[in-house]
Image: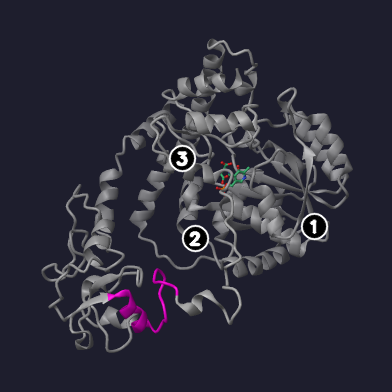
Amino acid sequence: MIGKAFKLSAFSRGTFWPIFFEIRTTLPCFQCSSFSSSRKCGGNDSKNKPERKKKGGGSDSKKTHSKDVCGGGGKPNKDKSSEGKLKGEIYTKGTSINKECKKDYKLGISEDCGRLGSSKYGGRKLTSADICATVGQRSCPGSKPTKDDKVIKGKKGWWSDVEMGPPDAILGLTEAFNRSKDDRKVNVGVGAYRDDNGEPYVFSCIREAEKRLLAKALNKEYIPIVGTVEFCKLCVELALGEGSPPIKNGNYCAAQALSGTGALRIGAEVIQRLSNGNKEIFFPTPTWGNHARVFTHAGLKINKYRHYDEKTNSFDYDGSLQDIEKIPESSVVLFHACAHNPTGVDPPQKQWESLSKLVKQKNLLSFFDMAYQGFATGDFNNDAFAPRQFVKDGNQIMLAQSFAKNLGLYGERVGCFSIVTSSKEEAESLLSQIKIIIRGMYSSPPIHGQRLVAEVLKDPELRCIWECELGAISSRIIKIRKDLRQKLEALGSKKDWKHITDQIGMFCFTGLTEEQAVRLTKEFEIYLTKNGRISMAGVTSKNVDYIAKCMHEVTK
Ligand code: KET
């Protein structure tokens, strides 16, 4: 443990940052393909030579691009040597624009986009209308609609019947939070980890993996439709345990996915298109708000079974057994592998064992949503108990893994979808069909995030740092749960808040009513979902007093 902590502190002190910055500053500018990140991106720099940014120079190259490149302020370029090459790629013959604008991808959006070099335009400023004419379009995004755009062949416009959709119940909260200018605002809506200063956290093992990847200067070729074999195997090993029988015997197939949601979506499509069973899936109640959408979008029927007992604030074991018992044979049943969202309440191991037997006996297909491995107890093996037990009992499970929370790769969208099969041959056939499904949805997965995950999973040193960090994260969450409960009790609240410390993982299902939750948001700027779920990861030692006071206020 001491060894772990020592290594972690070396990384978190940022010893690799100088190297990282050095590499970053010599990367080519993505808009003009020069190496400069100084004021101009090629147009007026003396000889178009690659230029190294000074360490810590910090000029915001994006800002420079939007202001200087597309602001029309650049002088016409006199250096003819590099003209023509890129121009030819973007503009049709006869038209050229000066270099500042040659690789501006916002074509048509800006009214004033540099100057035209061609004699046809007499060196005047280029407008979006000129660009439209140049690229052979009638109108460009951002330009005013024409009469023809509004009416399609005398009928309604293409999209004129589209109604405004409601904001997303979870991600919409972050949008509202970002819009608010109130100093009191607190975001405990989305399940994304924050450190005790309320800042997003990038794992040190990921920073180090990034550094190692940069040093390798790898290419950006397409990866296989289902991701690399190495990545998929590492993921399944993490979930089922190295050397577990399906891995040893090749009785599984797996595909890289767009994080946990993408993995669920592939699974939904696989059930809909390939399964011999019922096209109906049963969710625990309550469940993650997005489950229903993911599965109905693939055409499946959705249904439910009991999970949470509001009276005891614990897992409704009898209720779930009774409900699962009634599920028609050959249906699909979804389980949260650990750290159930939103309740933070999981079945104890003994109850998982009974559930597994029941599922096997009823010939149900279990689909595990595993978005929080390592977050429930800080231990990967503990948190994987349920899927491992189901496999041990001979259930051919489906599994959706996410690295959003347990490796902090939210925006990288890295996950894995897998199925345990009855034979190697079945796995091969299934994989061939999964490839066809994925190819038709998004062709192939992104390359960067999976490289980071593989780097961490296969390197014992990085893995050790990862475990140590996850341990620290879950300890902070456990501590802040205690603090919140204590503060509420100290304020004299008559309600029982024991469940705050009993629940595990990222969320606390507070028991607040929708009305109370809405009051917290409207009156006190505390952004939480309407079902009363609080992301404990957003509670810090600075805002815990305020949150407790407001929770007490709305529950008096
Ligand atoms: N399953 C569960 C149970 C889950 O809580 C989430 C995300 C996901 C899957 C999907 O995560 P992905 O980022 O696709 O790997 N939950 C949090 C974020 C969200 O709603 O998208 C949340 O509940 O706040």
Please state the horizontal and vertical placement of residue 511, each as a whole percent of the image: 65, 27
Residue 378 visible (yes or no): no
Alpha carbons under labels 2 and 1: distance apart: 30 Å
Alpha carbons under labels 3 and 2: distance apart: 29 Å
Q: Work out which residue is located at the far left of the displayed protein and give it.
A: 46
Taking the spot 53% from the left edge, 40% from the top edge, the residue there is 190
The answer as to whether callout 2 falls within 8 Å of ligand 1 is no
Count of marks, rendered view: 3
Quadrant of the image occupied by residue 49: bottom left
Q: Earlier in the sequence, mark 3 or mark 2?
A: 3
Please state the horizontal and vertical placement of residue 410, each as a whole percent of the image: 49, 47
Alpha carbons under labels 1 and 3: distance apart: 38 Å
- For the residue marked with disc 2, what is the amino acid? Pro
Crowding around mark 2 (Cα neighbors within 10 Å: few <14, some 14 to 19, many 20+) is many
Give the SS element for disc 1: loop
Taking the spot 81% from the left edge, 35% from the top edge, the residue there is 320
Give the color scheme: rainbow, by chain, secondary structure or one colour. one colour
Q: Earlier in the sequence, mark 1 or mark 3?
A: 3
- Numbered range of the magenta stretch: 127-145
Residue named by callout 1: 279
- For the residue marked with disc 1, what is the amino acid? Lys
Question: Mark 3–mark 2 contact, CB under 8 Å?
Answer: no
Residue named by callout 2: 446
Taking the spot 68% from the left edge, 40% from the top edge, the residue there is 287
Q: Earlier in the sequence, mark 2 or mark 1?
A: 1
Residue named by callout 3: 177
Camera-side residue of 110 and 95: 110
